[in-house]
Amino acid sequence: MMTPDTPATDPDAATATPPQVRRMIVLMLANLALSALLAVLMLVLQEQLLDYQLAHLDLPAGIDLAAARETLRSSAWSRVLPVALVALGYLWVIRGLQRGQRKAYRQVIFISVIVLLGSGLTLLQPFPWWMRAINVAKALVAVALLFLASRPQVRSRFAATNRPDVVDRFSS
């Protein structure tokens, strides 16, 4: 029987995902959702996107507009197709975060920096306001993810000396 003064021992408490790591996972899923939204909107609004880009590009006189349109169309598809692969990668990294793997922690930082740079670069391209808004939201999520990853509680969880997947072979 447990009394109010005795602490409850939960065997899963030691392996439970800390709140800071859960927040990181939520932010990764938010970034993935924004990427999926962007991909869907790019497919649904593809013709409007191509019209916008053609109207805002400095094209030389006499260029074949149909060829330019097809080039832009293929570049739109090259942005849409990787979302599925990124989704699988995110799920893999999330699983690693839940297990406390340092490699997953490093991957989160790498992914966040890449998303931040990629989102920033798209702001320099001729895209409509809705693409810019989604990319700004993705950049903000990446900044929040980097902020959470830099917190002492998170860094200590994934520190090289606190790795739960490495067993000390020399302990007695």
Image (tube, grey):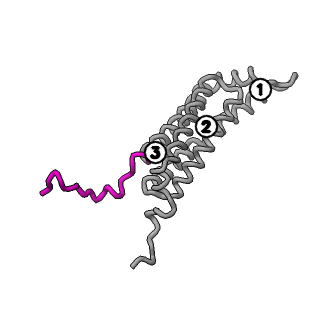
Please name the amino acid that badge 3 sits on: Ile
Q: Is residue 106 above or below residue 161?
A: above
Q: N-terminal of the two: label 1 or label 3?
A: 3
Residue visible at 36% across and 57% down in the picture: 15
Q: Which residue is mark 2?
A: 80
Pointer 3 local density, CA inside 10 Å: few below 14, some 14–19, many at least 20? many
**55 or 9, nearer to the observer:** 9
Q: N-terminal of the two: label 3 or label 2?
A: 3
Task: Report the Cα–Cα distance between label 2 and label 1.
Answer: 21 Å
Residue 25 badge: 3
Please name the amino acid that badge 1 sits on: Ala
The local secondary structure at tag 3 comes to helix
Residue 153 is left or right of residue 4, and the answer is: right
Q: Is residue 50 above or below residue 83?
A: above
The span shown in magenta is: 1-20
Residue visible at 47% across and 55% down in the picture: 156
Please name the amino acid that badge 2 sits on: Val
The local secondary structure at tag 1 comes to helix
**154 or 97, nearer to the observer:** 154
Residue 127 screen position, x and y as percent? 67, 26
**74 or 86, nearer to the observer:** 86
